Image (tube, rainbow, N blue to C red):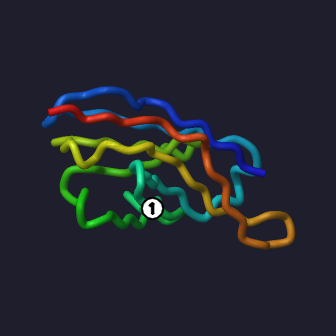
C-alpha cells in the first residue's frame, strides 16, 4: 500500500504563489507515477500535472507555464509549485500515486487533498 499526505494549501490573492507537497509512504519502490488533480465545487476531478518515475511530465493546458511538478525521490515527496494563480484555480487539490503491488497489479492511491482558494 501507498499512503499520501498533502500539505501547502491555503488562501492566496490573484497572481500569488503556493507550493503543494505530497509525502508518500509505504511501498515506495513500486510507484510508477504521481500526479496532482483538482476538483472545484460542481465540477469533475481533473488532472493538473503528472510526473512519471522517469521524470516525464504533463500538464493541463490551463496550468501549463504557471505550475511546475517535481519530485524528490530521496524523500518520497512530490511538489506542485503554483504561480500566477487565478480565481479559477480555486479547488480541492488531490495527490495521486499509481503503483504496482507485489503481484505487479497496477493500483492507485489518493490523498485526502488540500484546499487552495484564490481570491480576487
Q: In which quadrant of the rendered view does residue 84 lie? A: top left
Pick the front one: 25 or 43: 43
Q: Is residue 75 left or right of residue 87?
A: right
**As displayed, is residue 41 above or below residue 75?**
below
Q: Is residue 3 left or right of residue 58?
A: right
Looking at the rendered image, the quarter that the C terminus falls into is top left
Pick the front one: 110 or 81: 110
Q: Position of residue 11 (x, y in %)?
A: 31, 26
Q: Residues within 10 Å of mark 1 (few under 14, many from 20)?
A: few
Q: Position of residue 81 (x, y in %)?
A: 32, 42
Q: Is residue 27 left or right of residue 6?
A: right
- Count numbered badges in the picture: 1
Pick the front one: 49 or 44: 44
**As displayed, is residue 56 above or below residue 68?**
below
Q: In which quadrant of the rendered view does residue 83 lie? A: top left
Q: Position of residue 62 (x, y in %)?
A: 23, 61
Q: In which quadrant of the rendered view does residue 104 lie? A: bottom right
Amino acid at each position: 500500500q501507498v499512503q499520501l499526505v498533502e500539505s501547502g494549501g491555503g488562501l492566496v490573492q490573484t497572481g500569488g504563489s503556493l507550493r503543494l507537497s505530497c509525502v508518500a509512504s509505504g511501498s515506495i519502490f513500486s510507484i510508477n507515477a504521481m500526479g496532482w488533480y483538482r476538483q472545484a465545487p460542481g465540477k469533475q476531478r481533473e488532472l493538473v500535472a503528472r510526473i512519471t518515475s522517469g521524470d516525464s511530465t504533463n500538464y493541463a493546458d490551463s496550468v501549463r507555464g504557471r505550475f511546475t511538478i517535481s519530485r524528490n525521490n530521496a524523500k518520497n515527496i512530490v511538489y506542485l509549485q503554483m504561480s500566477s494563480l487565478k480565481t479559477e484555480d480555486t479547488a480541492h487539490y488531490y495527490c495521486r500515486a499509481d503503483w504496482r503491488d507485489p503481484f505487479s497489479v497496477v493500483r492507485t492511491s489518493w490523498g485526502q487533498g488540500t484546499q487552495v482558494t484564490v481570491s480576487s
